[in-house]
């Protein structure tokens, strides 16, 4: 059964840097008045029994999962597609086991294919993933993430098309990636509002009531994302983003991926609470 969020929760991408491991991560989040964290399975879906116990024993903290980086559902080789599909499924299985709200991942690269061709393939593969999850009685949001490089499949419009055609799929909106991919656009209150309006118009209020997003400072070029930065060193307009999220009464998880994760996550939450 899916978790139903009652507010916008502010999460760190991984354990706070001041934590040694999961054994004290949730205590540190309490001290910082933060709402949870994204479990980073970026190098593979693996965790020990000790980690499992620590996560399951958390109190009043929301968690999400980030799937492995080694996912390309548009690979040319069948075995790579099968391995990528398994990585998405394994991340969903971990979410079921650990009580996560939602999972996200970078779904694919174009590899010379047209957007429409890749999107059709993503619809087919995501429906197959959903059928497997249904057979295993796993009920969790699984979300392709908006991507930051123009070589990657994953514009907002592409992911919305998949979500329209696959149950249990919603977009994960990485606002920094959209900003970088557009070479500096999508950085004003009106532009952030346009993203949220597009989401709601295409997928309904459910998409705003069950939101999963990423944010960070970011360095970019005309090819898109280069690397994450702290807000202080970036042109990313997080204040206008938070104003838009507040205006639209967005509920769910906003995960901060800045290099100083707990500092910038706290900046986000404290500013949001002044609005």
Image (spheres, rainbow, N blue to C red):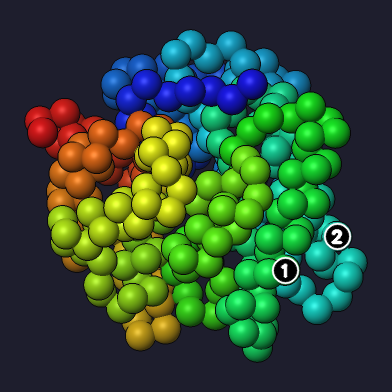
In the image, which is nearer the foreground, mark 1 or mark 2?
A: 1
Q: Pick the quarter of the image with the N terminus.
A: top right
Residue sitting at x 86%, y 75%: 77
Whole-percent x, y for residue 264 in the image: 27, 43
27 w.r.t. 153: above or below? above
Residue sitting at x 26%, y 66%: 186
Q: Pick the quarter of the image with the C terminus.
A: top left
224 w.r.t. 126: above or below? below
Residue located beneath label 1 in the image: 121
Residue sitting at x 72%, y 24%: 97
- Whether residue 54 is visible: yes
Residue 152 or residue 120, whichever sits in front: 120
94 w.r.t. 179: above or below? above
Separation of residues labelled 1 and 2 (CA atoms): 13 Å
Residue located beneath label 2 in the image: 82
The image quarter in which residue 70 lies: bottom right
Whole-percent x, y for residue 56 in the image: 62, 16
| Mark 1 residue crowding within 10 angstroms, few (<14) / some (14–19) / many (20+) | some
Q: Earlier in the sequence, mark 1 or mark 2?
A: 2
- Whether residue 259 is visible: no
Image disc number at residue 222: none
The image quarter in which residue 234 lies: bottom left
Describe the element under mark 2 as helix, strand or loop: helix
Whole-percent x, y for residue 161 in the image: 55, 61
Whole-percent x, y for residue 157 in the image: 46, 66
The image quarter in which residue 101 lies: top right
| Mark 2 residue crowding within 10 angstroms, few (<14) / some (14–19) / many (20+) | some
Asked whether disc 1 touches disc 2, contact meaning CB atoms under 8 Å apart, the reply is: no
The residue lying furthest to the bottom in this view is 112
Residue sitting at x 67%, y 16%: 53
């Amino acid at each position: 059964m899916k978790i139903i969020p009652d507010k916008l929760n502010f999460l760190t991408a991984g354990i706070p840097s001041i934590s040694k491991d999961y054994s004290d991560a949730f205590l540190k989040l309490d001290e910082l008045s933060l709402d949870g964290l994204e479990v980073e399975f970026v190098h593979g879906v693996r965790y020990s029994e000790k980690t499992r116990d620590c996560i399951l024993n958390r109190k009043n903290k929301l968690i999400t999962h980030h799937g492995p980086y080694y996912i390309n559902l548009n690979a040319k080789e069948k075995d790579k597609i099968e391995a990528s599909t398994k990585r998405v499924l394994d991340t969903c299985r971990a979410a079921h086991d650990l009580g996560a709200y939602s999972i996200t991942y970078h779904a694919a690269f174009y590899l010379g294919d047209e957007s429409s061709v890749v999107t059709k393939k993503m619809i087919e593969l995501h429906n197959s993933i959903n059928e497997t999850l249904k057979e295993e009685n796993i009920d969790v949001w699984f979300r392709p993430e908006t991507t930051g490089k123009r070589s990657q499949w994953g514009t907002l419009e592409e992911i919305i098309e998949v979500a329209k055609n696959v149950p249990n799929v919603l977009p994960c909106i990485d606002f920094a990636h959209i900003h970088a991919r557009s070479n500096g656009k999508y950085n004003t209150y009106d532009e952030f509002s346009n993203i949220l309006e597009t989401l709601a118009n295409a997928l309904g209020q459910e998409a705003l009531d069950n939101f999963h997003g990423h944010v960070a400072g970011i360095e970019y070029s005309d090819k898109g994302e280069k690397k994450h930065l702290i807000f202080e060193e970036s042109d990313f307009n997080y204040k206008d983003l938070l104003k838009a999220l507040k205006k639209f009464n967005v509920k769910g998880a906003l995960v901060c991926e800045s290099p100083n994760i707990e500092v910038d996550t706290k900046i986000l939450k404290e500013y949001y609470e002044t609005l």
